[in-house]
Image: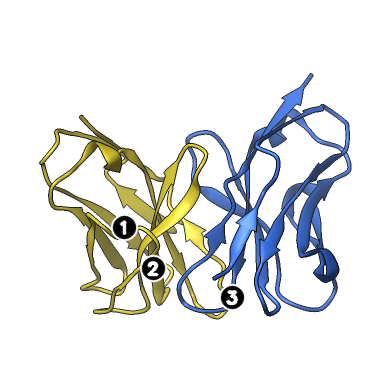
Chain colours: A yellow, B blue
């Protein structure tokens, strides 16, 4: 019963470094999402994908890139990390027809 | 664009007391509405959802929510809270497209013994 799995769960970066967060889902869902959660801000959508090979911008896409080369994986990249990107990142997937999101356990990123 | 307001940032309730968490949404058509719960250090778990039909929906863990179109509200209720209900609660809305859910800022629930 893996569901949505995110790696890594914790990461500390220095300003300017790059990294990739990996999200994998085993539910054969078409749609996948990356959100960030900041205190007092709720969850805000960064990017999403409606199928393999597709991506689209969400509410706060600047400074992030994504790729969906395989249906089960959705990668979130930071090319040049900034302290403002310190956050908890959540990946989610959805079958689409129900609009319900299934979430991973989150990845806590700190940028020094 | 749709939006969600959760007016209460923190709520403190005594164990065994009833609970109501408020949620107001802004969306022109009939929205799809959700409540999620997040325990410390965990992801979000779906409590319940409303798509259409009966305006009172039942969820997991003894929670229910009522959709009131006239008030643009979708308040979450539980008749008797348990210490394990202490968590962050998020209301969310979808307009039915692929662009995910729009979340409120959350209500932090504290349970007093």
Parent chain of label 1: A
Q: Earlier in the sequence, mark 1 or mark 2?
A: 1
Quarter-of-image position of residue B29: bottom right
The disc at residue A98 is none
Depth order, front residue of B12/B45 = B12
Identify residue for label 2: A32
Q: Secondary structure at mark 1?
A: strand
* Residue at 78%, 54% in the rendered image: B75
Quarter-of-image position of residue B21: top right
For residue A10, side relative to residue B17 (left or right): left
Q: Secondary structure at mark 2?
A: strand
Parent chain of label 2: A
Identify residue for label 3: B95
Identify residue for label 1: A23
Q: Are marks 1 and 2 in contact (CB under 8 Å)?
A: yes
The answer to whether B63 is drawn above or below residue B94 in the figure is above
């Amino acid at each position: 019963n893996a569901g949505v799995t995110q790696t890594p769960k914790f990461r500390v970066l220095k300003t300017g470094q790059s990294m990739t967060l990996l999200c994998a889902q085993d539910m054969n869902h078409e749609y996948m999402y990356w959100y960030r959660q900041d205190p007092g801000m709720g969850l805000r959508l960064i990017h999403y994908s409606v199928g393999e090979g597709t991506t689209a911008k969400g509410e706060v896409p600047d400074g992030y890139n994504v790729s969906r080369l395989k249906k089960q994986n959705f990668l979130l990249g930071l090319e040049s990390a900034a302290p403002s990107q310190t956050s908890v990142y959540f990946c989610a997937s959805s079958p689409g027809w129900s609009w319900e999101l299934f979430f991973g356990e989150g990845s806590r990123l700190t940028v020094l | 664009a749709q939006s969600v307001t959760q007016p209460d940032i923190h709520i403190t309730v005594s164990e065994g007391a009833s609970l109501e968490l408020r949620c107001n949404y802004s969306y022109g058509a009939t929205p799809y509405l959700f409540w999620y719960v997040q325990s410390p250090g965990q992801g979000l778990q779906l409590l319940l959802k409303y798509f259409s039909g009966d305006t009172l929906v039942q969820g997991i863990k003894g929670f229910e929510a009522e959709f009131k179109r006239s008030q643009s509200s979708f308040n979450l209720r539980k008749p008797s809270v348990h210490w394990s209900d202490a968590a962050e609660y998020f209301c969310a809305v979808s307009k039915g497209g692929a662009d995910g859910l729009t979340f409120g800022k959350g209500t932090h629930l504290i349970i007093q013994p």
